[in-house]
Every structure is written in C-alpha cells, then in structure tokens.
Image (spheres, grey):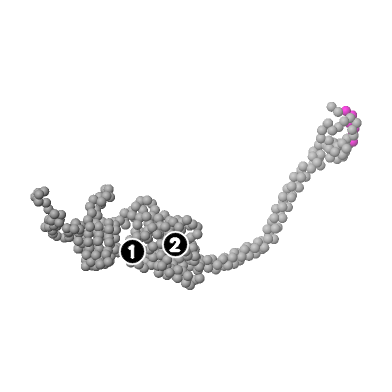
C-alpha cells in the first residue's frame, strides 16, 4: 500500500490495472449482449458498444466498448451476413468471443475475436414470433387477407423507390401485357432499404388512405437488393399498419427466403415485382374470360328462350278452339242460371202468387202517405187491372 508521501502516478496505477486484468482474465470469453452502437471506419476497423438490459425494467445494467480489428472484421462481417441475412446493426443480440483489454489511455474494452451467428438467428426468430403472436392476440394479423380482392384491379397505388429497377419492371410488365388491358398506376415513393423503410412505407400508406376510393389495390415492391436489407420489413409498426389497411396489399419484395412480417400480413405475397404485375394481369384476364363466356352464352340462352316460347305459343294455338268452346259453354251455363234467378224474381211471378201492385199516376205506390182522398189508383193483378178512387185514408 502506498502512502500519501509516495503516491502512484495515474499511468502507474493504470499499468497495475492492466497487469491485473491480463493476469486474472488471460483467456477468451464468450459474451452475450445487444449492439447499441456500430461504427465502421475507413481503414476497415469496426467499433461497437455492447450493452445488457435488465429484463424486467429494460434499463441498461452493463456496458462495454469493443473493437473488431480490420483483419477480423473482414472475415466476420461476410460470414455473419451470409448466415443471418443481417449486417452488424444496432439492436441485434449477439454472442461474441472476446478478449479483455485495458489500455492506460483508452481504458477498458473488448477485442472481438469471433461471433456465433446461430445465437442472433435464434433471437431474431424469437422476436418475429413475439410480433406475430402480438398481432394474433390483437386480432389484426389476417384482417388484410380477409378483404375481397377487386375483380378488375385497374387502379394501382405502388409503394416503391422511384429509382428501383423493380418498379420499372412492374410498369413494363403491365403496359406490355398482350391482352391490351389498361392500368392506372401511381407511385407513392418510399425508401426500400435502410433504417427509413418503416417510416417511408407507413407515410405512403397514410397518403393512399386519404383517398381510398381512388384505388383498387396497393402494391409494395422492392426488386433486388441485399438479403440483409429485409430486416426493415420485420417491424411491428409496419406489419400492424399493413394488416389494418382498408385496401388489399400485394407484396413483391424480391426475395426467395422465408416471408417477412410484411409478407405475412399482406393480402397476397408474390416473389418479385414482375410476378405482382402478372397477378394483376391474370385477375383481369379471368374476368375478361368470364365476360367473353357471358357474351357467348347470352345469344344461346336467348335463342333457347325464344324457341321455348314459340313451342308454348304453338301449343296454345292448338288448344285455343277447345279452350274457347269450354269457356263459352261455361259462360252460357252462368247466363242460364242468371236468367232463372231473374225470372224467379220478376213482377209477373210475384203477381201470380196472389200479390198485387198499386199504381198512381203511373208510379208504384209504396206508402199510404203517397195517396189522398179523391186520387185515382190502378190495382194490377196477374190477369188484369182495376181502376178505383181513394174515398178516405186511415
């Protein structure tokens, strides 16, 4: 132990720390952590910051600087990219083999010697599963798939980069279709790689949503690009926005590996922008074939209907005399019945039963109030009439 009269210099103390670390931690160690900073230099080195978070609170509980020297970085980076489809980037969980280093000037750091991609792949898969489960629990994961696909998808809102070759291929495929179908295509530009993909696509969706009546379908295409860029399509916010979008979404992001989260929630997923165009052309062709079938079927159906009606008319004409005779006979029978009823209620029949009719001035007398003394009346019997004069009225 040194005294205040014989103090150590800072350099000497740091040298002692360095010596102690070299003696106590001489080996290489496998360490897990999250990349919170990744900075590649022009000379080929890569400087990282590794952190560990408290699982309960999410707060940082440990932090260390690290260095991947150029000779190691030139080997680890392509190996990691090939195995995971991801470049070294902030937010990745990694398993690194490191040696512990302490420098008198730069302090504590880790020298990265190796990496285990399987650990990162497992964590990426776990994160994807968590997002899928969250979307499922919220009841939105299949909402876009449940939308009816338009019968005639002619008005197409495209989300892509204006300079993307895939967008040009998509337009060329639509415009050059051999059936002469016409499409209205409008580009809503967005980055298709990098950290701004999520923000760009969501902004484009918002612009389309402001006038959904103008569009039949939304197509998100990328075309080409590195596999490592696909991670930007695996975020919760992007998947959630697409899942709940009110128009069917077709994705043609141009990759062969497993679907991204964007592909999972989209209405229809195809591999390439060209395939997306072929899907729309095929949808139009199906309806065109149906219309052509209707055009062929309608004249045939009309001809059959006319023939059926002609046969029915012929049958009616053949049966018309019989039907008319039967109708006339029925009407004659009704007339006979009415005539009998009329005769039974005629005045002559009533008089024949002993009843009489009294008339005054040619009109039937229905009440004594119609007569007065001195009036001449006529009483009609079934076999004649008698004239008389009213002498008195009671």
Q: Which residues are magenta?
A: 387-392
- Residue at position x 33%, y 63% in the image: 229
Tell me: residue 363, above or below residue 56: above
- Residue at position x 34%, y 60% in the image: 195
Instruction: Say which of 365 and 275 sits in front.
Output: 275
- Residue at position x 70%, y 58% in the image: 324
Count all numbered tags in the image, as a single digit.
2
Tell me: residue 51, above or below residue 365: below
How many other residues sit within 10 Å of disc 2, few (<14), some (14-19) or many (≥20)? Answer: many
Give the percent coordinates (x, y) of residue 329: 71, 54
Q: Residue 13, can we see it?
A: no
Residue lying farthest to the front in this orientation? 5
Residue 250 as seen in the image, left or right of residue 100:
right
- The numbered mark at residue 188 is 2
Query: SS at mark 2?
Result: strand
- CA distance separating discs 2 and 1: 20 Å
Give the percent coordinates (x, y) of residue 306: 61, 65
Q: Residue 355, can we see it?
A: yes
Give the percent coordinates (x, y) of residue 18: 14, 57
Q: Quadrant of residue 239?
A: bottom left
Chain-order first, disc 2 or disc 1: 2
Q: Quadrant of residue 298?
A: bottom right
Which residue is disc 1 drawn over?
229
Tell me: residue 279, above or below residue 377: below
State if disc 1 and disc 2 touch (CB < 8 Å): no
Whether 216 is among the magenta residues is no
Q: Which quadrant: the C terminus?
A: top right
Instruction: Say which of 38 and 332 sits in front.
Output: 38
């Amino acid at each position: 132990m040194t005294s205040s009269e014989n103090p150590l210099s800072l350099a000497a103390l740091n040298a002692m720390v360095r010596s102690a670390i070299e003696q106590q931690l001489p080996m290489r160690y496998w360490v897990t952590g999250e990349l919170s900073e990744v900075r590649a230099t022009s000379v080929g080195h890569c400087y990282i910051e590794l952190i560990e978070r408290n699982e309960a609170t999410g707060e940082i509980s440990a932090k260390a600087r690290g260095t991947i020297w150029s000779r190691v970085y030139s080997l680890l980076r392509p190996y990691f990219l090939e195995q995971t489809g991801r470049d070294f980037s902030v937010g990745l969980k990694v398993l690194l083999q490191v040696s512990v280093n302490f420098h008198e000037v730069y302090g504590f750091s880790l020298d990265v010697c190796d990496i285990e991609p399987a650990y990162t792949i497992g964590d990426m898969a776990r994160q994807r599963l968590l997002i899928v489960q969250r979307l499922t629990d919220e009841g939105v994961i299949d909402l876009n798939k449940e939308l009816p696909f338009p019968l005639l998808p002619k008005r197409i809102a495209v989300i892509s980069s204006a300079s993307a070759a895939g967008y040009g291929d998509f337009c060329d495929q639509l415009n050059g279709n051999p059936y002469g179908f016409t499409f209205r295509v409008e580009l809503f530009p967005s980055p298709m790689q990098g950290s701004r993909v999520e923000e760009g696509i969501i902004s484009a969706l918002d612009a389309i949503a402001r006038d959904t009546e103008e569009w039949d379908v939304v197509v998100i295409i990328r075309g080409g690009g590195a596999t490592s860029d696909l991670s930007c399509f695996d975020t919760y916010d992007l998947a959630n926005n697409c899942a709940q979008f009110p128009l069917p979404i077709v994705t043609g992001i141009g990759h062969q590996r497993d679907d991204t989260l964007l592909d999972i929630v989209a209405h229809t997923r195809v591999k390439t922008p060209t395939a997306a165009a072929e899907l729309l052309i095929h949808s139009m062709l199906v309806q065109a074939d149906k219309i052509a079938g209707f055009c062929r079927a309608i004249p045939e159906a009309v001809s059959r209907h006319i023939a059926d009606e002609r046969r029915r008319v012929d049958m009616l004409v053949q049966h018309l005399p019989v039907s008319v005779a039967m109708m006339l006979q029925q009407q004659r029978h009704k007339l006979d019945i009415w005539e009998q009823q009329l005769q039974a209620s005629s005045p002559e029949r009533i008089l024949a039963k002993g009843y009489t009719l009294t008339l005054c001035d040619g009109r039937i007398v229905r009440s004594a109030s119609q007569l007065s003394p001195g009036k001449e009346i006529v009483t009609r019997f079934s076999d004649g009439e008698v004239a008389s004069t009213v002498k008195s009225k009671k």
